[in-house]
Amino acid sequence: MAEQQPDTANGAAAPAQPAGAQFSVEKIYVKDVSFESPKAPHVFNEQAQPQLNMNLNQRVQKVGENGYEVVLAITLTCTLGEGEGNTVYVAEVQQAGVFGLAGFEANVLDAMLGTHCPNVLYPYARQMLGELIQAGGFPPFLLQPINFEALYAEGLRQRNAQQKTAGNGDNETVGNA
């Protein structure tokens, strides 16, 4: 009887998984990383309130039948005051992952690639940026959580607005709405 339990457990696990949609994380990796501190070492003696600017973007590329590479790119620029010559540091990370997505409807697939995949990648990018900044001689910096669902919803709203203004007066709903 004890020998049959592992077989039963394995057999029971397979049917419990939905036959339609499947999501898997195949690989997570750093695609590109960069840190620059053009004013070092003089910047370490300056006393001013730093200003941080974050640029966030995402790219998706199909790799294989059900594989998608998602690249989450984050650039942090720290400056002291206004002007080009006041850059304290620039830290850039392109955190990437290959995800397997099969059996999703087009609008759900788009949402998974735009929300779920970046949510998986963000902690890795966040850690890498924190380590880069600290290794550059600056105080530790921890990025706050990002609501990718809200960013995706705003992007979807903007796409729908662009499609409506670019349309030729048709009243049909276009896009994933």
Image: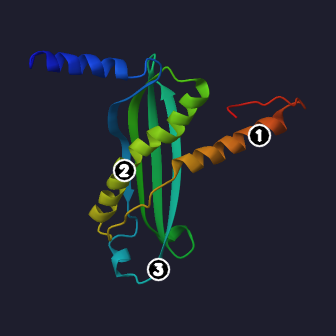
Between the C-alphas of marks 3 and 2, the distance is: 27 Å
Residue visible at 46% across and 59% down in the picture: 76
Q: Nearer the viewer, mark 3 or mark 2?
A: 2
How far from the left and from the top, in percent, is residue 150? Answer: 58, 50
Residue furthest toward the front?
Answer: 1
Q: Amino acid at mark 2?
A: Pro
Pointer 3: what residue? 49
Position of 145 compared to 110: left or right?
left
Q: Amino acid at mark 3?
A: Gln
How far from the left and from the top, in percent, is residue 29? Answer: 33, 38
The numbered mark, 1 or 2, whose residue comes first in the sequence reads 2
The colour scheme of the drawn protein is rainbow
Q: Quadrant of residue 38 in the image?
A: bottom left
Pointer 2: what residue? 123
Residue 94 visible somewhere in the drawing:
no
Residue visible at 36% across and 56% down in the picture: 129
- Residue placed most toward the observer, 88 or 164: 164
Pointer 1: what residue? 162
The correct choice, above or below, for 13 with respect to 121 in the image is above
Between the C-alphas of marks 3 and 1, the distance is: 39 Å
Q: Quadrant of residue 96 in the image?
A: top left
